[in-house]
């Protein structure tokens, strides 16, 4: 299967195939790259990534570091003159890359927090302070407040092999390596 | 379904023959099914007539690719056998057998019931930009009467707002004004400004037209355009003709060369001090003028309603509504024009701009705002504007940020080459956003796609090359005339390749940007063609019409409230 078809097929069941098919009609105008807040500081070149996908450069795209530099802010997605669903396509490519063992360390790290705490970004003192100021309970009614629920999340992680995907070590409760 | 039926499948557009046997099985006894390669060919049609006569066929179905276009081709068959074949439009993706069988279930006989009627030797032209003027001149020169209806107080349209035209850098006034003057003076052209067509009925050869004429509050025949009323009017508002760059009075002449050269009073802003009335030597001011309905008949109608400029606010990231250093291309045109509000002096915050960035494809090639099409003029007008500004500011630097340069017209590539040679930088990439830097200058963020590098350009003037869109009330106009509107929201032609100036209604034609964006060269070429089309039935004197050619009256007016000139900016 061509890489471009693989991307569309992978994202289709979740995002809809019409949504994913927009990948094919990129006209290479660069509106995405020109306004990418990440690309201003990092090496991500959104249009080039889309073009590489269209040219079926599977290995280059999946192994690239820049794939993980998108912050999913959806600026490109909002502005694209051909309505290419750029951010969702990027996320789908990441799913394929994840399956192939290309998951970036930073993303595995965030994922490990989901297993450890139930949150990709666990609560910290600053957030607690803000919550108090807003008149909310200091601890949100999530796994932070209900420790039993965390057990459920961990069971899910095992059942779905999410732990294997990110190379999670249950003994050290951290990433392997 | 018991009639002896002939089914003819014309397969040149369908990409191959089909299962004729399968269709035949489902037809009454004595029917025939034939696969034909070129049914539009006269010999094939003679065979068709022979079949009908010999086999006593009671009805005939022709399944073909472009049935809309081919209806008239089978006229000869109708004349010979007394009924017309029913055409079924089949496309490659269709199941041919299924579609034909389904159509046969509900087949109504078509009698060739055309009648011949006399043609009124006059034409209604709607819209008096360069396209409406040229058509009116051509039709007038052919010796026929023209009613030229224009909603604004003057003719000339957008071309009158331009400084120069591409690719030859002709002065737009120098080549446009003679056309306006000729239109205003032509003995066969009746010019109705401040007017809108509000109802059309009848059919080709004899359309009945109702026009609503808004009051000008000035007697057009008495006013000499001396401007003394304007000089003495105390009420000042922004000039629509100059897109708000510069003022006008409440009684005003939109621009110096306006045709008709007569003042118009804007009742919304008038203070009713009646100073104009007091100073006018000719006693031409008419405060009591009221709107009137004018009715007449014409043989043909030509729609030349043009375009509006894309509203740049729909792309908020470009900062058009936020920053006064971001302007649209038509505003720059007014700044460059010697007839403009600054008499051609280009000053941005009191200084001539030195670093100018053009943003292409604003509202064109942009599904996000609903305009999938290319506006066809922006690449060339931006290229031209670099030249216009350079004449006034010799040391200015220009960067045109583009998606693809489309220089397809006569002399366009050469002009593009010339401006590159003169130092204009063409940077391939669509501008993603514009914002103000700390020094007050604009920052333009764009990817240099050929270098795969996002860059930030500094500019003291950002020009948005706004695309062309259909006038906002095109749907109402289409409704009134029973025409179709295309996906691009412009009026739909009968066939884009071979009937581009005809509409679905016999006797109603169109030209210029009413059909879709095009430059002046193409618009003028098309309008002379459309003028010829519109005069064909007139010069022949008679036209054949059927019941389907009747225009149904739609009780919904397209008329807008005064002040009329508000429409200019779009």
Image (cartoon, coloured by chain):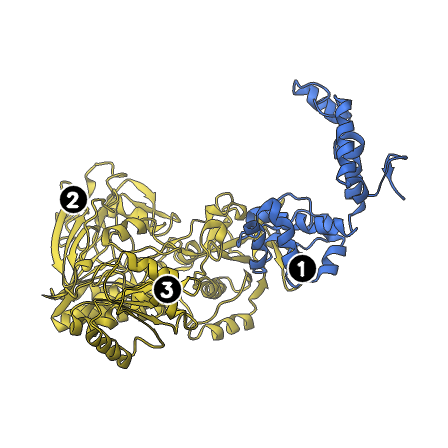
Q: Which percent across, then down, holds residue B87? A: 29, 65
Distance between the Cα atoms at labels 3 and 1? 35 Å
Q: Residue furthest bottom?
A: B43
Shown colour of chain A: blue
To which residue does mark 1 refer? A3
Badge 2 density bin: few <14, some 14–19, many ≥20, Cα 10 Å: some
Hey, which quadrant is residue B81 in on the image? bottom left
Distance between the Cα atoms at labels 2 and 3? 50 Å
When the figure is inspected, residue B385 is found, relative to residue A85, above or below; the finding is: below
Does the image show residue B347? yes
Q: Earlier in the sequence, mark 2 or mark 3?
A: 3
For mark 3, name the chain: B
Does the image show residue B354? no
Q: Residue furthest front?
A: B29
Q: Which percent across, then down, holds residue B380? A: 46, 66
Instruction: Using residue B247 as the reference point, say whether residue B367 is left or right of it.
Output: right
**Of A125 and B506, the residue lying toward us:** B506
Label 2, secondary structure: give it: loop
To which residue does mark 2 refer? B291
Closest to the camera, between mark 3 and mark 1, is: 3
Q: Which chain is yellow?
A: B
Hey, which quadrant is residue B1 in on the image? bottom left
**Of B384 and B516, the residue lying toward us:** B516
Circles 2 and 1: CB distance less than 8 Å?
Answer: no
Circles 3 and 1: CB distance less than 8 Å?
Answer: no
To which residue does mark 3 refer? B90
For mark 1, name the chain: A
């Amino acid at each position: 299967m061509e890489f471009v078809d693989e991307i569309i097929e992978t994202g289709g069941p979740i995002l809809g195939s019409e949504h994913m098919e927009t990948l094919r009609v990129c006209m290479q105008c660069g509106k995405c790259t020109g306004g990418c807040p990440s690309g201003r500081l990092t090496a991500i070149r959104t249009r080039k990534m889309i073009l590489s996908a269209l040219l079926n450069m599977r290995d280059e795209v999946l192994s690239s570091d820049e794939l993980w530099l998108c912050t999913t802010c959806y600026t490109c997605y909002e502005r694209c003159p051909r309505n290419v669903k750029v951010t969702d396509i990027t996320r789908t490519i990441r799913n394929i890359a994840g399956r192939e063992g290309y998951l970036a360390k930073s993303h595995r790290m965030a994922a490990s927090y989901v297993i450890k705490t139930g949150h990709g970004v666990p609560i910290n003192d600053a957030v607690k302070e803000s919550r108090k100021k807003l008149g909310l309970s200091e601890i949100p009614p999530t796994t932070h407040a209900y420790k039993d629920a965390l057990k459920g999340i961990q069971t899910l992680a095992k059942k779905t092999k999410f732990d294997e995907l990110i190379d999670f070590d249950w003994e050290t409760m951290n990433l392997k390596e | 379904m018991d009639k002896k039926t002939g089914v003819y499948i014309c397969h040149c557009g369908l990409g191959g023959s089909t299962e004729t046997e399968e269709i035949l099985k489902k037809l009454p006894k004595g029917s025939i099914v034939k696969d034909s390669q070129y049914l539009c060919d006269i010999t094939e049609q003679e065979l068709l007539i022979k079949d009908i006569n010999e086999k006593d066929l009671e009805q005939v179905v022709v399944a073909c690719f472009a049935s809309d276009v081919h209806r008239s081709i089978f006229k000869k068959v109708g004349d010979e056998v007394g009924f017309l074949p029913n055409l079924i439009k089949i496309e490659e993706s269709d199941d041919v057998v299924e579609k034909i069988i389904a159509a046969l279930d509900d087949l109504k006989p078509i009698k060739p019931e055309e009648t011949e009627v006399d043609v009124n030797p006059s034409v209604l032209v709607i819209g008096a930009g360069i396209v409406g003027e040229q058509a009116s001149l051509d039709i007038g020169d052919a010796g026929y009467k023209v009613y030229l209806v224009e909603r604004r107080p003057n003719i000339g349209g957008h071309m009158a707002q331009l400084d120069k035209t591409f690719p030859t850098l002709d002065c737009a006034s120098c080549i446009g004004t003679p056309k306006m003057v000729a239109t205003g003076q032509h003995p066969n052209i009746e010019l109705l400004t401040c007017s809108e067509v509000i109802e059309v009925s009848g059919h080709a050869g004899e359309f009945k037209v109702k026009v609503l004429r808004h009051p000008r509050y000035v007697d057009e025949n008495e006013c000499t355009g001396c401007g003394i009323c304007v000089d003495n009017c105390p009420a000042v508002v922004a000039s629509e003709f100059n897109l708000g760059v510069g003022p006008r009075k409440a009684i005003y002449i939109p621009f110096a060369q306006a045709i008709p050269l007569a003042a118009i009073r804007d009742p919304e802003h008038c203070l009713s001090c009646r100073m104009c009335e007091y100073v006018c030597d000719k006693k031409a001011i008419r405060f009591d003028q009221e709107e009137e309905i004018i009715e007449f008949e014409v043989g043909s109608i030509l729609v030349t309603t043009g375009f509006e400029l894309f509203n740049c606010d729909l792309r908020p990231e470009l900062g058009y509504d936020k920053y006064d250093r971001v302007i649209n291309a038509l505003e720059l045109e007014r700044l460059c024009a010697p007839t403009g509000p600054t008499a051609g002096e280009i000053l941005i915050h009191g200084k001539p701009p030195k670093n100018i960035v053009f943003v292409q494809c604003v509202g064109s090639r942009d599904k996000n705002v609903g305009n999938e099409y290319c506006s066809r003029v922006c690449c060339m007008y931006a290229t031209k504007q670099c030249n216009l500004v350079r004449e006034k500011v010799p040391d200015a630097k220009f960067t045109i940020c583009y998606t693809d340069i489309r220089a397809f017209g006569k002399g366009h590539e050469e002009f593009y080459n010339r401006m590159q040679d003169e130092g204009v930088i063409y940077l391939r990439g669509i501008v993603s956003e514009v914002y103000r830097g700390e020094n007050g200058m604009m920052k333009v963020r764009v990817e240099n796609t050929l270098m795969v590098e996002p860059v930030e350009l500094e500019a003291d003037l950002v020009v948005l090359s706004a695309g062309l869109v259909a006038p906002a009330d095109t749907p109402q106009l289409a409704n009134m005339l029973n025409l179709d509107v295309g996906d691009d929201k412009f009026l739909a032609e009968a066939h884009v390749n071979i009937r581009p100036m005809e509409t679905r209604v016999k006797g109603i034609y169109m030209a210029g940007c009413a059909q879709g964006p095009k430059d002046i060269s193409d618009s003028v070429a098309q309008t002379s063609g459309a003028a010829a089309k519109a005069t064909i039935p007139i010069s022949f004197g008679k036209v054949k019409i059927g019941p389907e050619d009747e225009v149904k009256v739609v009780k919904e007016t397209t008329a807008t409230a005064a002040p009329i000139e508000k429409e200019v900016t779009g």
